[in-house]
Image (tube, coloured by chain):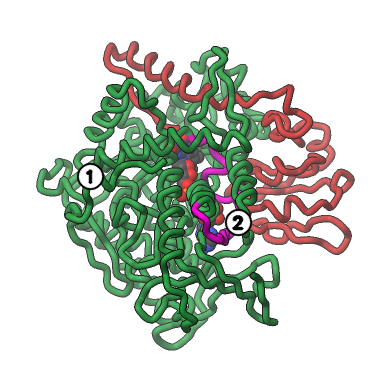
């Protein structure tokens, strides 16, 4: 299968999976189970890379019996989603997760709770991803670690027939894979906030999808933020459900647990430093914190902080599209995009259909990553099988950072990265949004894009990442500017009310020129297509 | 960010180089991985977890370099703490994975908050 020339490694596969987090690993598994020859390429290491690995994903988990329980869970989620969620999709991922997650038992030791019951839904990230890697390998999938994909390759009819990337632990040597179908599972992006595990997720999958002609959906919902001890990445919020907060004068702040807690915390942080104590955490949990989330106490221990006595400074890290929900628009029930041969899963896809206008973090995202991976992997295998294989020259689709539109110039990648952060992280820009503020951000980001698209030529991973960050930020800002209302995660200080006319999803796309439009329910989606496969 | 590899403990197995999602380490000449790109470190602690000889120390500081004193780190008992509490390898029987308790904590917090408010429990996320 592997044939290499001096400069380029060349492989063929039925299905190529881009990204080896939770979604990519499930996609690889299901494609292989469907009989496909599968290659999975990850920027880092499939097993530790991505936001799944460092966290502890709790899956959305409701037993099928009694059916009233699922009906209630779905009805609650539809209501919470403020008009953007779809009940059929929610039932579908609940069902798929319920069926599929326990099948990992060969590789993952599901915990037994204090009552002796097996718990499937709450898994620990490093062990889960280690198990998924073993499962993927057990199915004969070829894994390429440290092999970021840089661009997609298209056939003459525009369908996707492979990808090209580089082997960064092999002298940066280039590789290309011809494949019958490609699944993008390259995660979301936090725009380089210090959100745990997210630093290598720079929106590459969004950019590649857009270059192939796919659209994004829900990109305005990037205003999710998660608490962490200041200067740390530890955005794991469980212990904070019992937190008490103080300002720098030691005055207790009124930040009760509830839906607007993050907003209140952000406002407090705008006024000055905020300190936190976890003394209210029940003693039995304090005693077990290190076996519930072993990475959480590390931070305190190493800084010599006793979080149950001392007050430590906290911050909020942006979740971007990770605990936000935007991504590539899913066209069909099998994870297909609008582009033939291109499928999408996990945070690389929009999760509006299952999360609505609010964060999918907490349970829905994981159920989605698993289920959409299963759907996309299986469908990609089917497409690859039925595709007539011709030897055909494949056209590389990458533009910004690879093939400049104008005169090549050396660009300051670090400066581009900082500029994106400066538009996407500050509360006054991305959390408390205003029309004029968004317009100002959009001017800055447009200039950045012009620079990268016109002059970027180095073809390095860092430059492609910068291009993807800028592109993703631009879709987010443009969509936020078009949604002249407040809904869920999207908050416009100048339009605080919900507009019933905007109870719909917003699509965005385009590279040099960004377009935003209203989505309409697809007449092609029939209810019988929405049944979960076993 | 990763600040230290304790030479005497490192067996040069290469695991940290392989598992680092950000490609921070490189094989060195002297049989010790080299911290080639610390500025790319995402402070995820994965290298520590996969280091079977507990030779790696990652400082929790993600946005600033800190100087660490090797003797202090070695005697602090913090090397290998993550691997141990995760119940990996030889620790499997001593430290069980209790991740499943997470939702209980959220539920109890919601109930406590509701009691304080006298209303409905609030939903929360991880
Ligand atoms: C701290 C934290 C806690 C969370 N807790 C929960 C929870 O309890 N419940 C819940 O439902 N959700 C939770 N979430 C969200 C959930 O973890 C994600 O939705 C889910 O992990 C997404 O999986 P993924 O496979 O799409 O992305 P990831 O796991 O991020 O994987 C993406 C992969 O793509 C790779 N990649 C990126 N670019 C390229 C490229 N160019 N070429 C090749 N590979 C590439 C990356 O290296 C990475 O391995 C949490 C998130 C965080 C940050």
User: Which residue is located at x 29 percent, y 57 percent?
Assistant: A331
Q: Secondary structure at mark 1?
A: helix
Residue A227 in sight in this render: no
Q: Range of the magenta residues?
A: A34-57
In this structure image, what is the colour of chain A? Answer: green
Q: Which chain is red?
A: B
Could you tell whether B102 is left or right of A508 in the image? right
Q: Residues within 10 Å of mark 2 (few under 14, many from 20)?
A: many
User: Which residue is located at x 50 percent, y 25 percent?
Assistant: B102
Q: Position of residue B65 (x, y in %)?
A: 66, 50
User: Which residue is located at x 59 percent, y 50 percent?
Assistant: A136
Is A50 one of the magenta-colored residues? yes
Compute the Cα span from label 2 to label 1: 33 Å
Most common SS among magenta residues: loop
Q: Position of residue A124 (x, y in %)?
A: 57, 34
User: What residue did someone put label 1 on?
Assistant: A527
Front-most of residues A364 and B68: A364
Is A457 one of the magenta-colored residues? no
What is the quadrant of residue A517 in the picture?
bottom left
């Amino acid at each position: 299968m592997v044939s290499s020339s001096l400069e380029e490694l060349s492989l063929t596969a039925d299905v190529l999976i881009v990204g080896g987090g939770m979604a990519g690993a499930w996609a690889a598994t299901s494609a292989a189970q469907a009989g496909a020859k599968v290659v999975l390429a990850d920027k880092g290491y499939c097993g530790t890379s991505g936001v799944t690995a460092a966290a502890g994903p709790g899956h959305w988990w409701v037993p099928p019996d009694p059916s009233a329980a699922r009906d209630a869970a779905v009805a609650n989620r539809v209501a919470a989603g403020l008009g953007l969620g779809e009940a059929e999709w929610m039932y579908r991922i609940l069902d798929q997760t319920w069926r599929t997650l326990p099948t990992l038992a060969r590789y993952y030791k599901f915990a037994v709770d204090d009552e002796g019951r097996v718990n499937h839904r709450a898994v620990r990230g490093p062990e889960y991803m280690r198990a998924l890697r073993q499962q993927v390998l057990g199915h004969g999938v070829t894994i390429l670690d440290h092999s970021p994909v840089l661009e997609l390759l298209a056939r003459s009819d525009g369908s996707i027939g492979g990808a090209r990337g580089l082997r960064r632990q092999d002298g940066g040597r280039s590789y290309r894979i011809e494949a019958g179908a490609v699944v993008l599972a390259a995660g979301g992006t936090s725009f380089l906030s210090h959100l745990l595990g997210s630093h290598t997720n720079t929106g590459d999958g969004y950019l590649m999808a857009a270059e192939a002609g796919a659209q994004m959906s829900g990109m305005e919902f990037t205003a999710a933020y998660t608490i962490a001890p200041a200067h740390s990445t530890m955005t794991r919020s469980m212990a904070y459900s019992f937190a008490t907060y103080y300002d720098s004068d030691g005055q207790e702040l009124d930040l009760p647990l509830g839906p607007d807690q993050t907003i209140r915390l952000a406002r407090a942080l705008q006024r000055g430093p905020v300190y936190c104590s976890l003394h209210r955490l029940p003693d039995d949990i304090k005693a077990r914190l290190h076996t519930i989330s072993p990475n959480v106490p590390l931070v305190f221990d190493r800084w010599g902080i006793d979080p149950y006595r001392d007050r430590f400074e906290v911050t909020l890290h942006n979740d971007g599209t990770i605990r936000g929900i935007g991504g590539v628009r899913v066209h069909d029930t099998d994870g297909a995009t609008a582009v033939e041969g291109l499928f999408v899963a996990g945070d690389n896809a929009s999760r509006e259909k299952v999360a609505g206008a609010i964060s999918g973090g907490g349970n829905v995202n994981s159920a989605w990553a698993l289920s959409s991976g299963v759907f996309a992997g299986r469908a990609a295998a089917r497409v690859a099988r039925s595709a007539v294989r011709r030897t055909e020259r494949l056209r590389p689709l990458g533009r910004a950072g690879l093939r400049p539109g104008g005169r090549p110039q050396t660009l300051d990648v670090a400066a581009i990265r900082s500029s994106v952060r400066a538009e996407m992280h500050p509360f006054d820009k991305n959390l408390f949004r205003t029309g004029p503020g968004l317009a100002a951000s959009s001017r800055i980001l447009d200039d950045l894009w012009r620079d990268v698209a016109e002059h970027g030529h180095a073809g390095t991973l860092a430059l492609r990442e910068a291009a993807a960050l800028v592109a993703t930020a631009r879709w987010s800002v443009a969509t936020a500017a078009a949604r002249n209302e407040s809904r869920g995660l999207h908050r416009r200080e100048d339009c605080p009310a919900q507009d019933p006319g905007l109870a719909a999803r917003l699509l965005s796309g385009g590279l040099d020129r960004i377009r935003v439009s209203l989505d309409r329910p697809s007449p092609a989606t029939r209810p019988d297509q929405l049944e979960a496969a076993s | 960010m990763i600040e230290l590899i304790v030479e005497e403990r490192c067996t040069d197995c290469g695991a940290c180089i392989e598992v680092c999602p950000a490609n921070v380490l490189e094989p060195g000449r002297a049989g010790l991985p080299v911290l080639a790109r610390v500025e790319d470190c995402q402070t995820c602690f994965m290298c520590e977890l996969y280091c079977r000889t507990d030779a790696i120390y990652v400082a929790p500081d993600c946005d600033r370099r800190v100087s660490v004193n090797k003797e202090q780190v070695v005697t602090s008992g913090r090397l290998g703490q993550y691997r141990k509490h995760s119940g990996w390898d030889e620790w499997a029987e001593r430290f069980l994975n209790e991740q499943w308790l997470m939702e209980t904590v959220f539920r109890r917090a919601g109930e406590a908050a509701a009691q304080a408010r006298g209303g409905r429990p609030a939903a929360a996320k991880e």
